């Protein structure tokens, strides 16, 4: 089966892409608006964009459902303040993350709605999620408009990791972290780690 994604409905193409590009890490993005109101929302179009300078990127789509055709608060806040925080979601925080994904009014504080602790950041004004195992403070590098979506690139200006997830020597304990992955409509827990190749060739045997 061959499909030209450019020729089909956007929602159908989206379903094929999100069902194929899996699992995707989740950026739990905390921001504030110009009045200091907090916002928290998850995005699974997320990855590392550059190692030097350390840069992360997220893709923010348009509002959906009752807010279809509007600009998401995360994008508006980053545009105005030029700062944000990416918090890493692990499996125990799945329910709280899901609550923050609801289309809540702009004046609603997702930290309070999800029962989360906002912690003061060091270099940016946006708070980080106190319960998150890892958080990145970022300053906006640029926003690139890509059709219906916006690609946001941010330079990492501070990194936070809870002691229990740090192995030392700049390594993260991934077995303990149990990061949450996004699938098409569901989630997965990353807890089955292994190295490759799985079959080791004995010395002397070709």
Image (cartoon, grey):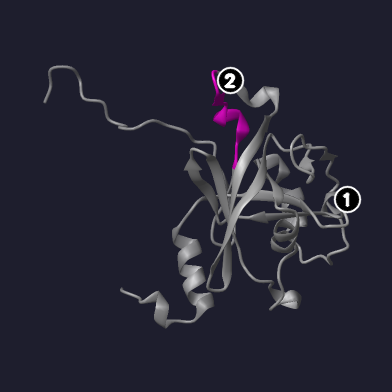
Which region is colored magenta? Answer: 169-179
Residue found at x 40% / y 82% = 7
Label of residue 112 in the image: 1
124 over 160 or under it: above or below: below
Residue at left offset 58%, top offset 56%: 142
User: Is residue 73 placed above or below 117 in the rendered structure?
Assistant: below
Where residue 160 sits: x, y (%)? Answer: 68, 31
From where the camera sits, is residue 163 visible?
A: yes
Give left or right: position of 20 versus 75.
left
Q: Residues within 10 Å of mark 2 (few under 14, many from 20)?
A: few
- Relative to 18, is 88 on the left or the right? right
- Residue at 60% from the left image edge and 36% from the top image edge: 178
Front in this rendered view, residue 33 or 4: 33
The x, y position of residue 202, in whole percent, is 20, 20
Q: Report whether residue 88 is seen.
A: no
Q: Secondary structure at mark 1?
A: helix
Looking at the image, which residue is at 54% across and 76% down? Answer: 11
Under circle 2, the secondary element is strand
Q: Which residue is mark 2?
A: 167
The first of marks 1 and 2 along the sequence is 1
- How far across and down, in percent of the image, does residue 162 sit? 70, 27
Q: Is residue 178 magenta?
A: yes
Image check: 7 left or right of 64? left
Q: Toward the viewer: 170 or 92?
A: 170
Quarter of the view holding residue 127: top right
* Quadrant of the frame with the N terminus: bottom left
Which disc number belongs to residue 6?
A: none
Along the line of sight, the residue nearer the viewer: 176 or 30: 30
Q: CA distance from mark 1 to mark 2?
A: 32 Å
């Amino acid at each position: 089966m061959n499909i030209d994604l450019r020729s089909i409905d956007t929602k159908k193409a989206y379903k094929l892409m999100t069902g194929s590009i899996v699992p995707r890490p989740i950026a739990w993005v905390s921001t504030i608006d110009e009045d200091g109101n907090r916002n928290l929302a998850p995005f699974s179009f997320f990855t590392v964009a550059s190692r030097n300078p350390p840069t992360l990127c997220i893709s923010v789509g348009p509002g959906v459902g009752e807010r279809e055709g509007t600009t998401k608060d995360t994008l508006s806040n980053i545009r105005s303040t030029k700062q944000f925080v990416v918090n890493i979601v692990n499996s125990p925080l799945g329910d709280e993350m899901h609550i923050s994904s609801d289309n809540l009014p702009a004046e609603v504080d997702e930290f309070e709605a999800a029962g989360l602790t906002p912690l003061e950041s060091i270099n940016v004004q946006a708070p980080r999620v106190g319960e998150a195992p890892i958080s990145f403070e970022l300053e906006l590098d640029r926003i690139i408009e890509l059709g219906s979506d916006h690609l946001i690139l941010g330079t990492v200006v501070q990194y936070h990791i809870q002691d229990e997830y740090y192995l030392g020597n700049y390594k993260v304990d991934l077995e303990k972290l149990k990061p949450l992955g996004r699938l098409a409509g569901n989630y997965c827990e990353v807890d089955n780690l292994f190295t490759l190749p799985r079959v080791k060739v004995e010395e002397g045997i070709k």
